[in-house]
Structures are given as C-alpha cells and as structure tokens.
Amino acid sequence: MLRQAPAHGYELHQRIARDLGELWHLRFNQIYGILHRLEAEGLVRGEMEKGANAPSRRRYRLTPLGEDHFAAWLHAPTPSSVRAIRVEFMTRLYFARLQAPELAERLLTEQVDATRHSLEQQQAALDQTQVEEPFNHLGIALRVRTLAGVLEWLKDCQVMLR
C-alpha cells in the first residue's frame, strides 16, 4: 500500500481493513510493529510529519529496496494450498490488479496452471494408494477435493475480474 502512496500507520490500518479485511486481520498495534521491522530492514522509511491541528506522526514511504522486494514478491509463485491461496495469492492478486489488470490475469492463469498440476499429482498419488490404508487414502482424497474446489474458485475469479 505504501507503493501507492506514503501513509502513516492509522491510514494503513484503515485501508487494510477496508480493502483486505477478510484476508488480513491485523490489530492497530501490529501495523506499527510491521512498519518498524520494515524500516529496520531498509524497505520503508519513516519521516515525522507535523500536523496543523493534530499531533506529529510518522509517515512512511517505500524505499527503492522496498520497491525491488515488492516487485519480487508480486511475481513469486504461490503454493497450491488453501491458506496460501487465501492469504498470499489473494493479496498478490489485489496489488497486481491495482498495478495492471493484465498482470492480475497473468497471475490468475499461472495459479490455475500450478493448481491443476498439483491436483494431477495428488490424483495420481490417490490412484496409487491402497484402500486398505484408509487414513492415507482419506488424507489424499481430501487434498484432491480441496484442490478441485480451489481450481473452480480460481476459474470464478478469472470470470469476475475480466
């Protein structure tokens, strides 16, 4: 979000709650902990800003190193697990769509392909598992069904975001 515009912690918290509240449940104090860590790593820089009718506060902006890290993260693959798709991929997709709709479409296509590949691998493993091994069979069957559901959901995302 700092790539879009510099902001202070309160503004970031409000934007995260508004735009990504169903994905990220961050308490207000967590935002400042994250900002301090990112600043120590050189990814953001904070500067004190004096308010006319408000107390001074620290406004953060992304550094060039932060820009590079963001770009690398945005294009990184997401594992095909429900949690990774819900949190990591959806967050990447949100920022990709803000940056360029065609980037969001490319990320979706890549994720569909990766999820389809994982589903095929799990289906092959299920086909090799003996029914006499019920918990192994059931565990893999759960992964197959979950990935099939994720794949359908990804296809719905493609339709909705077009």
Image: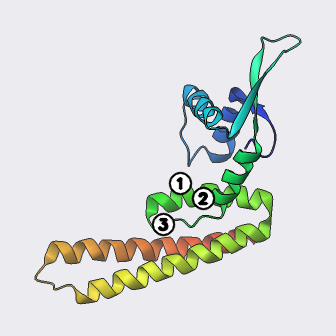
Q: Is residue 116 left or right of residue 102?
A: left
Image disc number at residue 90: 2
Distance CA(mark 1)–CA(mark 3): 11 Å
Please give the residue where the numbered disc 1 appears in the rendered image: 87
The residue at 78%/14% (across/down) is 56
Q: In which quarter of the image is residue 160?
A: bottom right
Are there few (<14), some (14-19), or many (20+) residues within 10 Å of tag 3?
some
The residue at 72%/60% (across/down) is 96
Give the SS element for disc 3: loop
Q: In which quarter of the image is the N terminus?
A: top right
Work out whether mark 3 precedes mark 2 in sequence or the reverse, and give the earlier one. Answer: 3
Give the SS element for disc 1: helix
Are there few (<14), some (14-19), or many (20+) residues within 10 Å of tag 2?
some
Q: What residue type is disc 2 on? A: Met
Residue 30 x %, y % = 55, 30
Say whether marks 1 and 3 touch (CB < 8 Å): no
Examine the rendered structure and indicate whether residue 116 appears above or below residue 20: below
Please give the residue where the numbered disc 3 appears in the rendered image: 79
Q: Residue furthest right?
A: 52
Examine the rendered structure and indicate whether residue 35 appears above or below residue 104: above
Distance CA(mark 3)–CA(mark 2): 12 Å
Residue 101 x %, y % = 78, 67
Q: Which of marks 3 and 2 is in front?
A: 3
Say whether marks 1 and 2 touch (CB < 8 Å): yes
The residue at 52%/58% (across/down) is 86
